[in-house]
Amino acid sequence: MRNYVSQRVHSVPPSGIRRFFDIAATMKNVISLGIGEPDFVTPRPILQAGVASLERGETAYTSNSGVWELRQALAAYLQRRYGVRYDPEHELLITVGVSEALYLAMTAVLDPGDEVIVPEPCFVAYQPEVVFAGGVPVTIATRVADGFQVTAEAVERAITPRTKALLIGYPNNPTGAVMTRDNLIAIGQVAEAHDLLVISDEIYDRLVYGVEHVCFAALPGMRERTITLGGFSKGYAMTGWRLGYAAAPAELLGAMRKVHQYTIMSAPTTAQMAGLEALQNGEPFVEAMVAEYNRRRRLLVDGLNTLGLECFEPKGAFYAFPSVARSGMEDEEFAEALLTEEEVAVVPGSAFGASGAGYVRMVYATAYEKIEEALNRMERFMRRHG
């Protein structure tokens, strides 16, 4: 039988994260620092809003764009928090998580052969989504010396006549890096000079520690060339609800909505009603979760540095990205040995791109006591391995 799988799909390797999760699932006493989702249950008022929606019988499709009241609340939120205005009728789209929003953005704007600049290390889906849409990902490395922030100079060097867009994700998964306003302004100037579209994944916007998150679209002159991707999964502990959004100028948003109409119809109705409650009354819960993440962040980062696993200070998301050079191992070897010898699951940095080699991603979205125990196990491990 001939091979029916498209070359486009065949060319993309399986996720580098999955293998370690599969191994960990077979072990009884694993402490997982690998899964990038909150360990908190969705706050009760948000849960109740979803349940109440079901009890009212709200089980039909919504508008393709999403519940009107949710889009209104989202527009008010973005203006209040970042000072950027979006028309809820024509410039906001509710999606099935940020993953769908990313797919829609790539499918709506890329023609075959269009290049998208993708700074690494980055979320594992970025390059595959470019490929699935027929584009060509052009990766550029970020460095720990720059706090894993992409620079305008690196972006400019990667531009060719085929470059159509820049895809950035800050606060960053896997490094925890946060971009400064000055660096983003410089990147915006490069985007304007070369007429590039900027796709800005800001799903971790609420999870920052002692610094400001800068919304790229809110920078001078950037709104009209930016697709902002965001959602409810991380800040409100709503990963399983699958609720995200895209904000963009009407022409771009309309193209994304067209793909969404034919592919999805509408985001889950129950999740949308829960999201409305999150925007209206969820702020105290977000602040409490951020405070607890910050406490865990300090424990993990300080502990890693004490063990000789040198780790720059992450300012956002809930990831630490230490170097494993002291162990004398490659990152995949380190992750596998730590899992089999001490039952601590982490993810090799190379799963997030070539520039992640030599590092591992550790998630501090797990209980404080489990992080303490993981550090005890890593201490034993490092006594044997450097």
Image (spheres, helix red, strand yellow):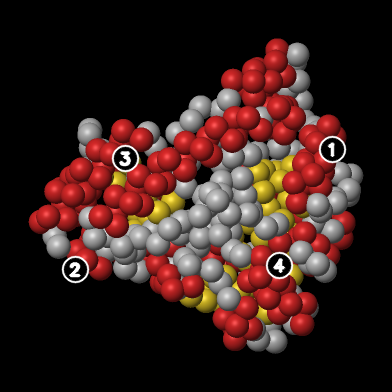
Name the foreground residue: 222 vs 226.
222
Name the foreground residue: 373 vs 5.
373
Q: Quadrant of residue 151?
A: bottom right
Q: Residues under labels 1 and 2: Cα distance? A: 53 Å
Q: Quadrant of the N terminus?
A: bottom left
Q: Earlier in the sequence, mark 2 or mark 4?
A: 4
Which residue does the image show at 46% across and 56% down from the upper left?
314
Which residue does the image show at 79% across and 44% down from the upper left?
80
Q: Is residue 246 left or right of residue 300?
A: right
Q: Earlier in the sequence, mark 1 or mark 2?
A: 1
- Amino acid on which disc 1 is placed: Gln
Name the foreground residue: 165 vs 187.
187
Number of other residues with Cα within 10 Å of mark 1, as a class: few under 14, some 14 to 19, many 20 or more: some
Q: Residues under labels 3 and 1: Cα distance? A: 40 Å
Q: Quadrant of residue 264?
A: top right
Can I make out residue 326 in this image? yes
Q: Residues under labels 4 and 3: Cα distance? A: 36 Å
- Amino acid on which disc 4 is placed: Val
- Amino acid on which disc 3 is placed: Ile
Q: Quadrant of residue 168?
A: bottom right
Q: Identify the residue under disc 1.
A: 72
Q: Identify the residue under disc 2.
A: 328
Q: Earlier in the sequence, mark 4 or mark 3?
A: 4
CB contact under 8 Å: marks 4 and 3: no
CB contact under 8 Å: marks 1 and 2: no
Which of discs 3 and 1 lies nearer the camera? The answer is: 3
Which of discs 3 and 2 lies nearer the camera? The answer is: 3
Which of discs 4 and 3 lies nearer the camera? The answer is: 3
- Amino acid on which disc 2 is placed: Gly
The image's mark for residue 198 is 4
CB contact under 8 Å: marks 2 and 4: no
Q: Is residue 189 above or below residue 313?
A: below
